[in-house]
Amino acid sequence: MKIRTMKLLIKEGTNNVIKNKLMSFASIMTVVATLFFLGIILLIAINITSNIEAMKRDLEITVFLNVNATNYQREEVVSFIEAKKEAGVITEYRNETKEQMYQNIKESLNDDSLLEGFSVDNAAESFYIKLADPNNSDEIITEISRFEGVNNNNGIGYGKEELDKLEGILKVFNYIVMAVLVVLMIVSIFLISNTIRLTVFARRHQIEIMKYVGALDSFIRWPFIVEGLLIGFIGAALSFFITSQAYQWLQGVINAILANLKLSTLRIMEFGPVAFRIFIIYSIFGIVIGGIGSLLSVRKHLNV
Amino acid sequence: MIRFVDATKVYSNGVIGLRNLTVRIEKGEFVFIIGASGSGKSTFLKLIMHEEVPTEGEVYVNGYSVHDMVQSEVPYLRRSLGVVFQDFRLLPNRTAYDNVAFAMQIVEATAREIRRQVPLALGLVGLSKKARAYPDQLSGGEQQRIVLARALVNNPAVLIADEPTGNLDPKTSIEIMNLLEEINQRGTTVVVATHEKSIVDTMKKRVITLERGELKSDVQKGSYFDEN
C-alpha cells in the first residue's frame, strides 16, 4: 500500500471516530473501564509480589545447636557459615550464645519462679542466617543439618513455607483475575465491534460506491480498522492517566497507614518505575481489543 | 470486449435472471439493453460487473472470466468499467470535485494525476464551474453528469449505465444521452440499460432486447419496437 493511501485511510478512520461521537465515547469508556480494572489488579499483584520478595530477603534461617554440643562441633558450624558468607551465599548472620538465650528467656518470662530447673546449661546456642537468594534455603538447610552439633529435632527453622503458601494463593488469585479480565475484554470487543458496525451501516452507500469503482478490500476495510485501533488506543491512554492518578493517591494514603502501624517492611511501590511497563501493557491491550472489535464487525458486515 | 456464452443465471430464490444468453459486444460499440421489468436487463449488467456470477455458461469482460474469478481480481475488473446508476449514488458530504477525485483515490492515483484528471473529466461533462458544489446544490441532470465524470475519470474501457435517465426530465435525458454518445465516440464502449423508447428510437444504435431472461432480438440501428 502506498503512503498517500495509508494517510488517506488513517484520516478516514479518524474522521469516523469524530463523526460517531456518542458511540465512540461509549466504546472508549468501556476500554477505559476494562484497562483500569486490569491495571488495578496488575498493580496489586506487583505490590504483593514485591512485598513477598522483600519479606523473603528478610527471612532468617534459625539454627539451634544441641544443648551438649562440643566446642569443636560449634566451630564446625561457624566455619561453614563463614565460608558461605565468604562465597556470598550468606549475607549476614548473628549468633546467640547460651547465656544470651538464658537472659532473653528470663527477661521475656519476667518471673524467676518459672525458670526453676532451667539453667544456662540447659540453654542452646543458636545462629540466625540471612541468605542472598532465598531460593538457596533448601540447599543450605540440608548442608547445615549434616553437622553433628546441630539439633535436627526442630532445631532448624525457616518461614519460607508460609511465604510459598502465600504465593500459591496469589497464583489462584491471578487465575480468577484472568477469568474476569477475559470476560471484560469480550464485553469491550463486543461494544467496539458494535460501534464499528454502526459506522459501516452509516457508510454503506459509500462502501457500495467504492466497490463499484474497484476499491481493493483492504482499502475499504482499513478506515474501520483504524477507527477500532484509535478507540482502543485513546481508551488506553485515558485509562493510564486515571490509573496513575488513582494509584499515586492511594499509595500516599496506604503508605501513611502502614507507617502508622509500624509495618516498615510492607510498603506500596512508587508508580514511576512501573509506569512505562503499565503504559505499554495498556496500549497493547487497548489496540488488541480495538483491532479485534473492528475486524469482527468488518468481516461480518462489510462482506467485500 | 464483452461476451456472454450460453449464460444462465438462476437466483437462489428460484427466479430466473437470464436463460442461455449468448451475445457479443465489441470494443467501441454503443449498445442499448431493453426489455420490461424482470426481462433480465439488470441481471445482464450485474453479471458484467461481477455483482452476480452466472449459474451456468461463461461471461467474459475486458479479458476477465467473470464466471470463474477469484474474489481478489474483482476490483481490477471493476476498474476497467465505469458505472452509472439511475439514482446517481454520489457522496452527499463531498463536493462534485471530491466525488470525482474519490474514484481516483480509490485506485491509488497520485495527487498530481488527480489534479490533472478531475478537471478534465468535469470539463468533459460540462460542469467545470460547479466543481465546488455539493450534490444537493445540483440539479438531477448535473448530478448525473458528475456521476458520468466519476465513471470516466479512470479511463475505463467500458461504461455501463443502468437506467441513467430514469430520474431525469426528457430534455436533460437527451443531454445525458448526447454526452454518452460523445464518450462513445472517444473510444469507450457504452452499454445502456433503459426502457425509454423515445431515446432508443432517436439514437439509432444497436439494441439488444431481452424478454423473460432470453434474447428476443439483437438489431443494429434498432428501435424500441423492432421485432426482427
Image (cartoon, coloured by chain):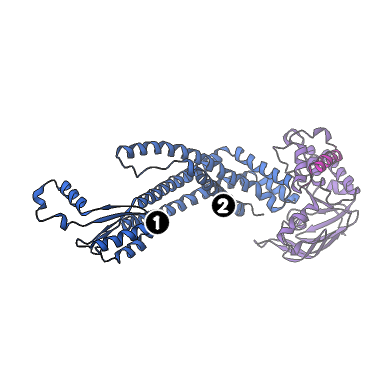
Chain colours: A blue, B purple
Q: Which stretch is magenta?
A: B108-127
Out of A217 and B198, give the one closest to the viewer.
A217
Q: Secondary structure at mark 1?
A: helix
Out of B59 and B96, give the one closest to the viewer.
B96
Q: Is residue B191 visible?
A: no
Left or right placement of residue B148 versus residue A103 in this view: right
- Say which residue appears at 33% left-offset and 57% top-offset: A160
Q: Provide the major secondary structure of the magenta segment.
A: helix
**Amino acid of disc 1:** Glu
Identify the residue position indicated by label 2 in the image: A292
Quarter occupied by the C terminus of chain A: bottom right
Q: Is residue B47 above or below residue A237?
A: below
The x and y percentages for residue A177 are 42, 52
The chain that hosts pointer 2 is: A
The x and y percentages for residue A98 are 20, 54
In reply to whether residue A65 is colored magenta, the answer given is: no
Q: Place residue A161 in its image quadrant.
A: bottom left
Out of A48 and A41, give the one closest to the viewer.
A48
- Between tags 1 and 2, which lies in front? 1
* Whether labels 1 and 2 share one chain: yes
Mark carried by residue A86 = 1
**Amino acid of disc 2:** Ile
Left or right placement of residue A112 versus residue B218 in this view: left
The chain that hosts pointer 1 is: A
Out of A169 and A56, give the one closest to the viewer.
A56
Q: Going from the N terminus, do you reach mark 1 or mark 2 first?
A: 1
The x and y percentages for residue B42 are 75, 54
- Residue density around tag 2, few if under 14, some if 14–19, many if 20 or more, within 10 Å: many
Q: Is residue B115 above or below residue A138?
A: above
Q: Is residue B193 above or below residue A155?
A: above
- Say which residue appears at 70% left-offset and 38% top-offset: B92
- Residue density around tag 1, few if under 14, some if 14–19, many if 20 or more, within 10 Å: few
